[in-house]
Image (tube, rainbow, N blue to C red):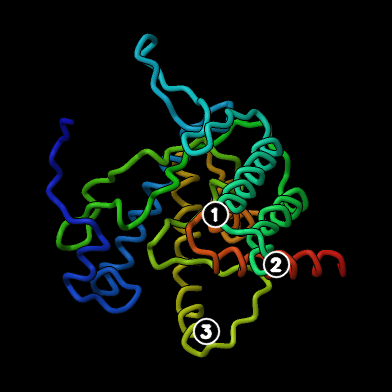
Amino acid sequence: MLMEYIHGSAADDLRFIQKSAPAMFGTPEQDQKFRRQMAKIQAQVLAFQFPKIGSLYYDNDTESFYIGPEIDSGKGPWTSSADYYRDLSDVCMKEAAGRYHRNPENNTYFCAPVLLHHLMSIYSKDSNGPYNLINRDFGCHNILVDNDFNIVGVIDFDGVFAAPPEAAAQYPVLSCMDVEPPCIIETNPHRLEIIESTKLKLLEYREWMMKYEAEFSDGSAPISTLLGSRGALIYHGFESCRELFGFQNKVWFTSALEMLREYAKA
């Protein structure tokens, strides 16, 4: 494999080397600058649109990019977001069935994707495209920066995907901008402090994304306005359930139940 050299450090490595404050990348000024640059890159990628949902491929014969099956599941491509969410739910259930033994304690892991799929049918609009390009592994572990936290490069593009609106409206992963599952009441004082301090970062990032998405498109920001929406959070639940941490499934199962109860009461 031949790779071009980029002189920089992964942002998550540098923040530990420089002993940054918790959830910060360098100084407060550097941290804000870094997140603003992330928002601009993410918005720029959104500007590329395709008629189908799926992973990005390159055709050597035609020298053009096209959308094919999702790399992880082998399913797709999809022309409808409803079809994509149905298959995503099936994949999550099959992964949970293979990962956890059959016993009452693990039923929540298996059922969480079913509840999330039903909620997605409530809170999302069936889209038929076009679909925006995203990098599902876009985060500080794959962003190279200089010693002042200026972004100099982005690596690891195997997560590039043409996604429906709710899937595209996600904050960068592993970048100290974690969103909380809806309808979960947190009582731990330390966690409450972290949640409150994160709210401002999420709000700032959403505003930057809306600004840059409008600049790279026709002046509107249909994806960025969905950041933090119920549909976007439900999709985040799907992604969390596919991770190798059982507690995530249990938390999202509880969240999904409370969202359904909230919807039923309304």
The quadrant of the image that shows the N terminus is top left
- Number of the front mark, 3 or 1: 1
Above or below residue 202? Residue 154 is: above
Type of residue at label 2?
Pro
**Foreground of the two, 178 or 86:** 86
Number of the label disc, if any, that sits on residue 104: 2
- In the image, taking residue 29 as reference, residue 115 lies left or right, namely right
Q: Is residue 65 found left or right of 21 in the rendered image?
A: right
Image position, residue 167 (x, y; %): 57, 47
Residue 10 position in % (x across, y down): 23, 56
Q: How far is disc 3 from disc 2 in space, using C-alphas?
A: 31 Å
Residue type pointed to by label 3? Leu
The CA span between labels 3 and 1 is: 31 Å
Residue type marked 1: Arg
Q: Secondary structure at mark 3?
A: helix
Mark 3 closeness class: few <14, some 14–19, many ≥20 residues within 10 Å: few
Q: Secondary structure at mark 2?
A: helix
Q: Quadrant of residue 14?
A: bottom left
State the image coordinates of residue 152 (x, y, percent, origin top left): 21, 49
Q: Secondary structure at mark 1?
A: helix
Return the mark for residue 99. 1
The answer to whether residue 81 is above or below residue 11 is above
In the displayed structure image, the side of residue 108 where residue 12 appears, left or right: left
Residue at point 54% right, 46% down?
168
Residue tagged by mark 3? 192
Q: Which mark is residue 15?
A: none
Check contact, mark 3 vs mark 1: CB within 8 A.
no
Residue at (71% x, 48% y) in the render:
124
- Camera-side residue: 29 or 158? 158
Rounded to the nearest angstrom, the CA distance separating label 1 from label 2 is: 14 Å
Ranked by sequence position, the earlier of labels 1 and 2 is 1
